[in-house]
Amino acid sequence: MNSSKRGAVYGFKLQSLDLLLDTKSTDRKQTLLHYISNVVKEKYHQVSLFYNELHYVEKAAAVSLENVLLDVKELQRGMDLTKREYTMHDHNTLLKEFILNNEGKLKKLQDDAKIAQDAFDDVVKYFGENPKTTPPSVFFPVFVRFVKAYKQAEEENELRKKQEQALMEKLLEQEALMEQQDPKSPSHKSKRQQQELIAELRRRQVKDNRHVYEGKDGAIEDIITDLRNQPYRRADAVRRSVRRRFDDQNLRSVNGAEITM
């Protein structure tokens, strides 16, 4: 992201869509795609159904444009051989009828093939890719996988919200029952302690929802916090982890000096 030493990021490659599933939260229950799905639904609802605009992507992924173009070329070669044969035997009525009936159809196929090739080149360039290095067999499956994963993330987010709502309702019911019990009863005290523990955990999560992590797991919190606090950092900026270790070492040194004194 823009907070790294690599400099500003102005876009991303289509292959990066597959990596959205690899970046996970610290509890490894959510991915960056889950977070993106939530943001889109809450703040950009008008584009939340973007996948409905991607028509026939699955069909396009199942068809090899390269083979279609090769087949059209083979048909043209076959038509050329037929015409050559007809010039040598111009009295052959079958060849004449074949040429008259199919020459126009072949021309239509060639025009359609060119339109398909030009349209594919345009859409690949539109997404910032190179048509020479990104064939249809690679381009379209990226969207198929992304749409499938995005829909699954939407469903999982919705299920998680329902579960949280059900848990909240259950906790409220328990709290209402405890209010009716004798405050001195052991069951009341144990449940009250449980409720206080849950409340304390919630306060801690709200106060500091950024957890320490290593590797890819937990990168969501780091990315979000960086973008919120430091949208862009120069390439010569000191990494936070290095600065944190430096501050800790200084603090230990000061404490040690005070104890010695």
Image (spheres, rainbow, N blue to C red):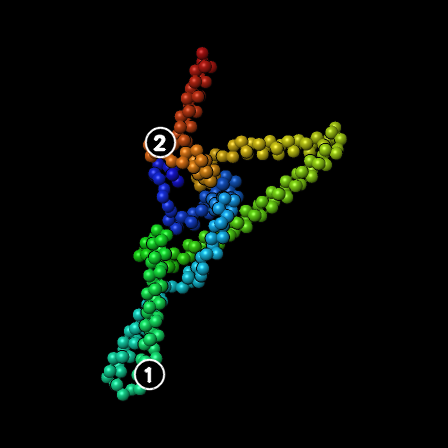
What residue sits right under mark 1 in the picture? 97
Q: Position of residue 232 (x, y in %)?
A: 38, 36
Disc 1 crowd, CA 10 A, few/some/many (<14, 14-19, 20+):
few
64 or 109: nearer the viewer: 109
Kind of residue indicated by mark 1: Glu
Identify the residue position indicated by label 2 in the image.
237
* Mark number displayed over residue 10: none
Quadrant into which the C terminus falls = top left
Q: Can residue 209 be seen?
A: yes
Question: From where the camera sits, is residue 214 visible?
Answer: no
Please tell me whether mark 1 sits on a helix, a strand or a loop.
helix
- From the viewer's perspective, is 48 left or right of 13? right
* Amino acid type, residue under disc 2 in the picture: Ala
Q: Is 55 placed above or below 109 here?
A: above
Residue located 52% across and 32% down the image? 208
Rendered location of residue 22, percent (x, y): 45, 46
Image side of residue 182 versus residue 112, left or right? right
